[in-house]
Amino acid sequence: MIALEPYRVWAPIAHNLRLRINSEENSEVLEMHRDPHRSGWWVCDRIAQVGDRYGFEVFDGTEWSITLPDPRTTSQPDGIHGLSQILDPDFEWTDQDWTGRILSAQVLYELHVGTFTPEGTFEAIVDKLDYLRELGVTTIELMPVQPFGGERNWGYDGVDWFAVQESYGGAEGLKKLVNAAHEKNIGVVLDVVYNHFGPDGNYTGFFGPYTAGGSTGWGEVVNISEHGSDEVRRYILDAVRQWLDDFHIDGLRLDAVHSLDDRGAFSILEQIQYVADQVESRTGVPRVIIAESDLNDPRLITPEENGGYGLAGQWVDDIHHSLHTIVSGETHAYYEDFGTIEILAETLRNGFRFRNSYSGFRGRTHGRALDLTTTPPWRLVTYTTTHDQTGNRAQGDRPSMNLTPRQQVLKAAVIYLSPFTPMLFMGEEYGAQTPFPFFCSHTNDELNRLTREGRFREFARSGWDPKDVPDPSSAETFASAKLEWDFTSEQAEIHEAYATLLRLRKDLRLVRSDLRELQVEHGPNWLTMGYDDVVLAVNFSNTEVTLPIGGDLVYSFSSPRVTEDETLLDEWGFALIQR
């Protein structure tokens, strides 16, 4: 809903519809009528005014509904079940000098607003921007901030796709964060979920066919391919345009696009990229679209002129899995397809582990090879961990809670000194010892019970005792995830190492445009990765190893011995060498 326009809503299945406006003075109920110019839309003659609290009531042919929030609400001051509010669209932006960043120039930092700081607000993040800039971060990636039930949630249960969680600071708070970040020369990417609606507060079914039946595992399939899907697509695309244009957001991370039931001749991903291109063309500031996909499908990041969707980048779990299994020794579930240095080397050379090859975990052939002649490696976003790879563990334990400092920094060296776009997950840069378990605070006790029992059943199949799995709806579970910012001496050393690696990535110009130039060699317990002028040597074992590579030592977190002809690495050691 936009101020100074008539109230309107898409409700093709409604038999009748009325508008309720609550002001400080009184409550009014106004009749709405079908819009003769837009099929399925209803309109009221009343002009929306800034500050109005309002909702819609739908008659289904038998009875009137309760007062419902606007599906396109931009503010829910009383939560997901309350009235919507008309916001003042004006904001005093001072980021006119911000020129943006293309993906190849980015170091991403994924964070959860509610647990990144003690306060859990956008305003509190502003106070950490200098810290992030000094670390080497160029762009923060916010986990979803759309409204959800209560005040504790990862964000993937959002229901109002145009609004911002009020407890974080609402729309005004998000704009202030973006403005402040741009003034510090830091970009902001927003994680958005268009593959399902959260289970708490989703009232779209009263209005129209926003979903199409079936399940993604998290909720009903969003209707982007069935009858009425044009308006649902427009719903998504208008939200995309709002974030990129009205909020000056620098890009979007699209959650689990493999769960989209997208059967149109024009993919919704293409359409989202088109909106981003339009905003970029008009403003001159780059807007990046990054997808999360489990398909290993090159079309996502293949240029449009070569038959792809033209997205800027995508998350790549294969590199994470390859590295995680070697260092941790874990080979359960989807990790069974990884676990050797040979697989890590092959994945680094090709970007994808599965390229029309057999996956034992899936029991089928999976993926397709990237065209390395047209796909620069920086289109692949890589990481040592993410909210998923930490939070979807039974106890939400971070790698830093199980690995030595040397192992943690070794993993970071492989990721940050590679030609892929790196992303950190909040707290890993100092070896945080706080977990990041799944948490929620649905306003319905039954939903909380079902969520809790579902988590217990999921991990019981892997041998976990339910009493050892945190209760997602418990306030203590959420509190345990809050980062602690008083570093120990060991954490300070890890932090310094992370900052050094990110600086060296930039200084040595390791963002190179052709993955075929990356030279990767390996032995039974070691790997080298690099170019003619610089190479990273890594020891993935508890014993010393000698490699036939020499030169000048640039950096290490341990005590290697580097000569002109060879390098001796101590256990879980690495050496960055110029030659």
Image: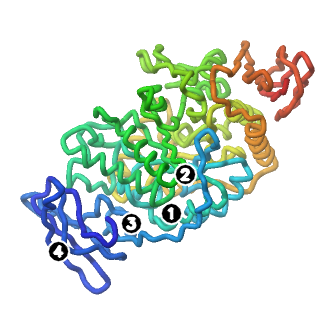
Rendered residue at 63%/43% (across/down): 106
Q: Which dot, 3 or 2, sits closer to the camera?
A: 2
Element at label 1: helix
Query: Counting residues from the N terminus, which is met first, the one under dot 3 or under dot 4?
Result: 4
Q: Which mark is first along the chain, 2 or 3? A: 3
Q: Where does the image place residue 197, in percent across and percent down from the top left?
A: 34, 48
Q: Which mark is residue 75?
A: 3
Which of the two discs, 2 and 4, sits closer to the camera?
2
User: Hey, what amino acid is under mark 4?
Assistant: Leu
Residue 459 in the image: above or below residue 355: below
Give the mark nearer the N terminus: 1 vs 3.
3
Report the front residue among 562 and 428.
Answer: 562
Q: Residues within 10 Å of mark 4 (few under 14, many from 20)?
A: few
Q: Gap between marks 2 and 4, in whole Å?
A: 42 Å
Q: Position of residue 291 (x, y in %)?
A: 47, 38
Does residue 439 show up?
no
Q: Is residue 430 above or below residue 353?
A: below
